[in-house]
Image (tube, rainbow, N blue to C red):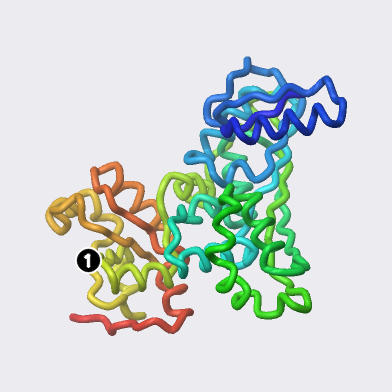
């Protein structure tokens, strides 16, 4: 059995635990999941716990997993679900932000978000019989320190940071004195490397293309997009078709249909450094458009997660179509 982590600190902690248990048949290594240092067809099983979430290229990780699995080998994964249903991370994160503490964005932890996205990523990587189940959990939290410890075990936040956020986290938990419950949502998944490679050679669906694309771009929620627009110089780029504009548009949005993006982007968006938030009806076409803009050299591009419908669903301002 071989264990892998990109953190030397985590590997050292794992080795101490193994030594304390008297186990001798487990080898732990520091390494990158995106470039696994193993030969093809090496393992019968690969298990990944909360690792795919934080990798810059989840699709690359899954391709590497397929490479090192033996034909017929199995992959089992545990990943985080949606941001909105993982209060065990968002409550401490918001407390850190409120205390003006330096903290990396949580975006990397929520790249996958849904079972559909994860199943599509596994299928695109060449795995078959991909199954994913969403599991919602309510954690019993004795106090804010307990909540912090759970979150820090996932994010790697320093224990020293707790004292800076204690008061804010106590308020966020609200009922810590009597035992609070906070939400956690996990995606449990299983898939198999086909014995016959032709099993995986099937046409890609639009959903699988979008899922792969989302692993390569940045997305923002309507709340984050609205806040960024208030604080920064941001262009909202509407890539819907003409007839879709009858439902309204985001305030001061620029309209450039997806089909004309490559032709007109350089004319309508001459500054490649400009911050751009792309949106479509549901956020799928905008993901593809955001990736294309990145490929065209635009450096600060996001896709609006959930699209125009999610913006409307939050009751944020919408302007009527002009012209």
Question: Dividing the picture into quarters, in which one does residue 250 lie?
Answer: bottom left
Give the residue at the far right of this rendering.
22
Q: Name the residue under label 1.
A: 233
The image shows residue 24 at horizontal and vertical percentages of 83, 20
Most foreground residue, 321 or 97: 97
For the C terminus, give its image quadrant: bottom left
Does residue 122 show up?
yes
Q: Is residue 18 above or below residue 240?
A: above
Most foreground residue, 78 or 126: 78
Point 73% across, 64% down: residue: 136
Point 49% across, 44% down: residue: 212
Q: In this view, does 8 lie above or below 189?
A: above
Marks counted in the figure total 1
Left/right of residue 272 with respect to residue 219 in the rendered view: left
Left/right of residue 42 with respect to residue 105 in the rendered view: right
**The residue tagged with tag 1: helix, strand or loop?**
loop
The image shows residue 176 at horizontal and vertical percentages of 71, 75
Most foreground residue, 319 or 216: 216
| Label 1: few (<14), some (14–19) or many (≥20) C-alpha neighbours in 10 Å | few
For the N terminus, give its image quadrant: top right
Q: In this view, does 248 lie above or below 73?
A: below
Q: Is residue 252 above or below residue 52?
A: below
Question: Dividing the picture into quarters, in which one does residue 73 lie?
Answer: top right
Question: Dividing the picture into quarters, in which one does residue 17 lie?
Answer: top right
Point 33% across, 68% down: residue: 228
Does residue 201 show up?
no
Left/right of residue 321 with respect to residue 96 in the rendered view: left
Most foreground residue, 174 or 127: 174
The image shows residue 194 at horizontal and vertical percentages of 70, 28
């Amino acid at each position: 059995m071989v264990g892998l982590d990109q953190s030397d600190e985590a590997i050292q902690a794992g080795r101490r635990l193994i030594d304390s248990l008297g186990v001798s048949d487990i080898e732990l290594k520091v390494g990158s999941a995106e470039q696994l240092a193993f030969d093809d067809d090496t393992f019968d099983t690969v298990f990944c716990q909360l690792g795919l979430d934080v990798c810059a290229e989840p699709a690359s990780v899954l391709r590497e997993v397929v490479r090192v699995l033996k034909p017929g080998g199995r992959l089992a994964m545990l990943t985080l679900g949606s941001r909105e249903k993982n209060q065990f991370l968002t409550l401490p994160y918001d407390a850190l932000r409120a205390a003006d503490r330096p903290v990396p964005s949580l975006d990397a932890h929520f790249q996958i978000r849904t079972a559909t996205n994860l199943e599509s990523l596994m299928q695109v990587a060449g795995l078959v019989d991909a199954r994913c189940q969403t599991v919602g959990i309510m954690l019993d939290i004795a106090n804010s320190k307990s909540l912090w410890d759970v979150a820090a075990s996932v994010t790697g936040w320093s224990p020293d940071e707790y004292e800076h956020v204690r008061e804010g986290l106590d308020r966020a938990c609200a009922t810590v004195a009597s035992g609070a419950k906070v939400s956690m949502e996990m995606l449990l998944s299983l898939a198999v490397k086909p014995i016959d490679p032709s099993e995986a050679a099937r046409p890609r669906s639009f959903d699988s293309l979008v899922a792969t694309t989302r692993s390569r771009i940045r997305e923002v929620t309507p709340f984050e997009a609205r806040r960024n627009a208030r604080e920064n110089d941001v262009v909202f780029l509407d890539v819907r078709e003409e007839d879709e504009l009858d439902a309204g548009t985001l305030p001061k949005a620029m309209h450039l249909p997806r089909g004309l993006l490559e032709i007109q982007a350089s004319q309508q968006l001459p500054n490649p450094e400009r911050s751009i938030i792309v949106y479509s009806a549901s956020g799928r076409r905008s993901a593809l458009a955001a990736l294309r803009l990145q490929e065209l050299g635009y450096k600060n591009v996001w896709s609006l997660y959930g699209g125009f419908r999610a913006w409307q669903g939050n009751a944020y301002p919408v302007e009527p179509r002009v012209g």
